[in-house]
Image (spheres, grey):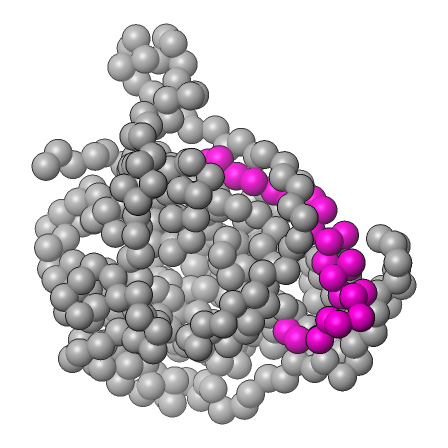
Amino acid sequence: MSILPPVRGRGAPANQASQRFGLPVREADGDWLDVQASIDDALPPLRTTVTVEHPRSILSRNTSPDLPFDQSVNAYRGCEHGCIYCYARPTHAWLDLSPGLDFESRLFAKPDAAKLLRATLRKPGYVPKVIALGTNTDPYQPIEADYRITRDILEVCLEARNPVAITTKSDRVLADMELLAEMARHDLVAVALSVTTLDGAIARTLEPRAATPRKRLAAINALAERGIPVHMNVSPVIPAITDHEIEAVVAAGAEAGALSASFIPVRLPHEVAPLFRAWLDAHFPDRAAKVMGIIQEMRGGRDNDPDFGTRMRGQGPWAELIRTRFRIALKRAGLNRHAWRLSVEGFRSPADGMQGELF
């Protein structure tokens, strides 16, 4: 099998087809090939494109016993961060696009998200609960700087006093610091920063367009200093690639001001598995077989375990070893001793319009 060379600044090495939906293989990326570049046998850099979409509803619900929330809002489809392990990659296949390079370069934005959420929160039957942001793709990926959809959503939630849990791996979250601090004063927000590795070289290939580990830790510190509860996701833990850093990452998060931390062993659902294998062959050919061997040991002999109860934890000796090390690291760092609280007690129906009273 030929090894695909890395695409500069991107996570996936190619636009692999979706075997589930018969998606045809695309060149990287065929629609954007420059004629002269193709003649010279050199591809130009991939450009990011954004398509605006107008969904009829914005609040997604789930009944998974593995997740601590049952409703969420996703402002964007696709994610320019390009994390090779992203479990959301297969969702692009539903759009007849590749979970590979298309996922991280052909993005979709939902500028009506705040308007739709406002209408949902105004419905008589709405029951206030925590709304999760960043459950599928990052709410603070680079295009948020232009579209500001996440900020609009937060403003509606503050007005309605509906709590929000944010998951991101971007220090762009600090752009909304004042808004988040106001929400925190009403127990309306908690932020989870994902820190996978402290090694900048690994991060550049693993999460090529995400904030550096140093910037994420600085964001944890800045949020904590403003009284905003911060959780750290040490996820995913990748055996023989990042697992040796568990103790160091936990300690760094605690020092930065995180109140708690958690982890998930790497998951490789559907099209993520072949993309991840190609990434291993390109960047870690010396240990690719070892990495996949350990992952399969943790996933019941498969590349991925989709079953509730085990998919977020893994199974077997390797998974148990990681859990034990993480538990000891938490104890040493003094994390997970105090639970942060999000409150729905102050919920109120937002105003009928986009300009409500925020503060």
Position of residue 238 in the picture relative to residue 170 (left or right): left
Residue drawn at the location 38% of the way across and 54% of the way down: 86
Q: Where is residue 190 in the image (x, y as percent from the top left)?
A: 61, 73
Which one is nearer the viewer's eye here, 255 or 43?
43
Residue drawn at the location 78% of the way across and 66% of the way down: 123
**What's the magenta region?**
104-130
The total of numbered circles placed on residues is 0
Which quadrant of the figure has residue 64?
Answer: bottom left
Position of residue 110 in the picture relative to residue 136 (left or right): right
Residue drawn at the location 49% of the way across and 91% of the way down: 337
Which one is nearer the viewer's eye here, 251 or 94?
94
From this viewpoint, is residue 298 visible? yes
Q: Where is residue 296 in the image (x, y as percent from the top left)?
A: 16, 64
Which quadrant of the figure has residue 220?
Answer: bottom right
Q: Where is residue 188 in the image (x, y as percent from the top left)?
A: 70, 75
From this viewpoint, is residue 10 visible? no
Residue drawn at the location 14% of the way across and 66% of the way down: 301
Q: In this view, does 332 lie above or below 322?
A: below
Magenta stretch containing residue 113, yes or no? yes
* Quadrant of image for the N terminus: top left
